[in-house]
Image (cartoon, rainbow, N blue to C red):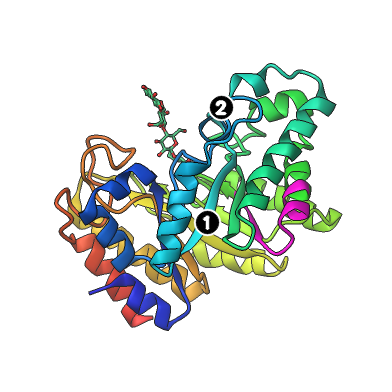
Amino acid sequence: TSLRNEASKKDILIGSGAINPMYLNDPEFAAVLANQFNSLSPENEMKWSFINPTKGHYNWDTIDRLVNFAEDNNMVVKGHGLISSCCNPDFLLNITHPTAFHTAMKTHFEAIMHRYDGKIDRWDVVTEALKTQGGGLNNNNFYQVLGPGYIADAFRIARAAAPDAKLFINENLVESLPGKRQELYNLVSSFVAKGVPIDGIALQMHITEVAPKPGVITEMVNSYKALGLEVAIAELDVHTLDNAVETDIYGAVVSEALDAGITDISFWGFTDKHAYTWVQGAKPLMFDQCYKPKSEFYATHAALTNF
Ligand code: G3I
């Protein structure tokens, strides 16, 4: 039983994010990843301080490894972490002049996007631009030095560096917080009105207590479609501590997403194996610690089959 077989028949990208290339040393991990998914993205390894810890020095090996693995297994890669709310290196944080900071951002984007030109064609350009609970922009280092315009600037730089790639703004909790959902919509629709190059929104969907209300995903897809944009799911996982509830949420979210027209769904990892998921103490993913498929997996597979 394979998610990717079912998804590929229907032109759906079904992916696992949170792939630390080190995990590929584990043959079972690598086998499940390649058998089940047709897309993957790194966990932290493309975030600024990981890939470019000091000025001019890039750790290409880790991401090259992911890209090569994807190529060998006929998978695609999504770039994650060009701008994230964590993980910025000291050399960047020490830049206080806006022009120099902007140049550093451009240099960074160009280095990464040019290296993976033709190999990575979907990018989370800015992750977590909004405050976690909504109510304004995150006061991150980019905001502090460049002001609110850094987001549009990031998209302009990204489009120039990778003209054929799809560019996403990646955000958390918008499916469960109506106010934040509206804020993201206002921000993105203002980009469209100003001609800022953006292709869609990537919903993280780290689901804790509550699943999104039925209809919310569909409503978002429709409202962004009216702007000419796409909605993707980028980091789905469910941490409720109740297996039956988790299973229902996996099934419901994936079904509604597919019915609404979403063609790009990624999970934030796939195995509950200790240290392979960022949520310690929970079992948020589709495979257990021994790579055995859980009921969450079968619910997802059924949603893909029935679509
Ligand atoms: O690499 C250091 C290590 O040297 C040090 O000894 C250790 C001590 O704590 O920390 C290590 O860094 C940690 C890093 O993961 C690598 O393991 C950081 O502390 C830790 O904060 C970091 O967490 C990551 C988190 O993003 C950072 O914001 C998670 O692994 C990662 O799964 C998570 O992913 C994010 C997405 O990028 C964006 N959406 C939300 C999602 C979950 O938070």
Front residue of this view, candidates 250 and 177: 250
Q: Say if 27 sits above or below 7 in the image.
A: above
**Horizontally, is 166 left or right of 61 in the view?**
right
Q: What stretch is highlighted in magenta?
A: 157-169
Depth check, front residue: 213 or 217: 217
Asked if residue 94 is positioned above or below residue 195 in the image, the reply reads: above
Residue appearing at x 58%, y 32% in the figure: 52
**How much space separates mark 2 and mark 1, taking CA atoms?**
21 Å
Q: Name the residue under label 1.
A: 78
Q: Judge whether 298 appears above or below 130 on screen.
A: below
Quarter of the C terminus within the rendering? bottom left
Which residue type carries mark 1?
Lys
Residue 24 image position (x, y, % from top left):
31, 50
Callout count: 2
Q: Is residue 233 magenta?
A: no
Q: Residue 53 carries which label?
A: 2
